[in-house]
Amino acid sequence: MNLPLPDNYEFVWLSSALSGHAAMTMYLELCEVNICKYIHHNPFIIYSNIFMQLLNNPLKYNVIAYTDYTHVYVSRGDLKRFLNLLNKNKPVLYLVRDPISRLKTGLNHINLKANRLDRFDLDTPIERVLDRETYYFESPLPTCDHIKTYWIYAESFFRLNFLTQFFKIEKITYLDMASIKPEYAYHTFSQLNALYHFRQISKNLFHNTVVYDMLGAFLSIPLILCVDLENFGVNYADGKIIEILITTRQFFKLHKINNYKKINPVLFKDNLPFENLIFCIPKEQFVYLENNLTLIKCIQSYLEEFISKMKVKFDLKAKCLICENQILAYLKNNQTLMRQWKKIFDQELICIKQHHPNIVASWKYYQEFEKMCEELD
């Protein structure tokens, strides 16, 4: 791991967790940027995989990406070894976000259960399929208590200042997550294109790119409905099971699911309550479905009930989600905890406050947090 990485990359993209990295990934890939990245806790494995990605793509527009996930922890010492192998003369793009909003997303973040069903059939109770997620410490609902029982100990949640020290200050461009919301993304990427000269794409592609909303998190590992053709008197050539993939439009793009055909129009005449929800099938299996009305009606009946029950579940969950103001109120009532977080943020934000105070000033909830801390003194 002492050998520097191949130099055929244009810039380094860094991101803290819970800061919009999935949407940013989708945008960059639309611009034909080849993102060289590998998620692992072992820096040698990260290094080896990125090394091969660069070596195998000598003519592409490559960037090296590292997202500081809280659930895949890389120690500071190991991370230092990896980052020291990057070219310090390369530009760096760092995706940042209001830290109180990051906490909100973290508290509302679901964890998929170990015993969840990713594959099921038409006889599987829908309630069993939908029972697939929990929150930290197996809590049934999000709670602000996890600010003090989990997030304050999630060391990789606050390493912005640590990560930037390995690069030249003048080479770092900070990008606020708010600037890649769908309504601002085209303008933002036009500005980034002027800096980094990747492919510019049309404005109409910059829409509907929220990847990890409630539905996206729920389907971060797609569901697969397995249908036994033998039960429907179908003559099959390759196999007796067809597999219907249940995912979102964003994941369909993000994971480049090219060998599947979307079948929403075949199954549903009306618009679905989830506009991003899609059902797709391997292209070679579509022939078994398209003209078999009995098969279509049976699948349709099951999935309509599935969607209806998922809608009820999500409507109830939406009422329990935590917002930034609840976090601020919780911290205000826990002043010792608030002082602990202030100490963390003061260290975390040294560099960005010094060089891009405008971004920090735009963080509504962090500014409210600072005012609360001033009132303590």
Image (cartoon, rainbow, N blue to C red):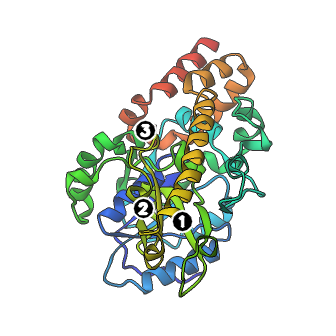
Residue beneath the point at 66% across and 17% down: 332
10 Å neighbourhood of mark 2: few (<14), some, or many (≥20)? some
Quadrant including the N terminus = bottom right
Front position in the image: 28 or 342 = 28
Q: Mark 3 sits on what residue? A: 354
Q: Please tell me the numbered disc located at residue 313.
A: none
- Name the residue nearer the viewer: 162 or 73: 73
Q: CA distance from mark 3 to mark 1?
A: 52 Å
Dot 1: what SS? Answer: strand
- Residue type for callout 1: Ile
Please say whether residue 365 is visible from this viewpoint: yes
Of helix, strand and loop, which one carries label 2?
loop
Sequence-earlier tag: 1 or 2: 1
- Please give the label number shown on residue 263: 2
Q: Give the residue type at disc 3.
A: Gln
Please identify the quadrant where the C terminus is shown: top right
Of residues 228 and 31, the one drawn nearer to the viewer in this rendering: 228
Q: Which residue is mark 1?
A: 244
Rendered view: 203 above or below 288: above
SS type, badge 3: helix
Contact, mark 3 vs mark 1 (Cβ under 8 Å): no
Indicate the position of residue 63 as horizontal and vertical percent values: 39, 69
Residue 321 seen in render: no
Classify residue 85 as left or right of residue 203.
right
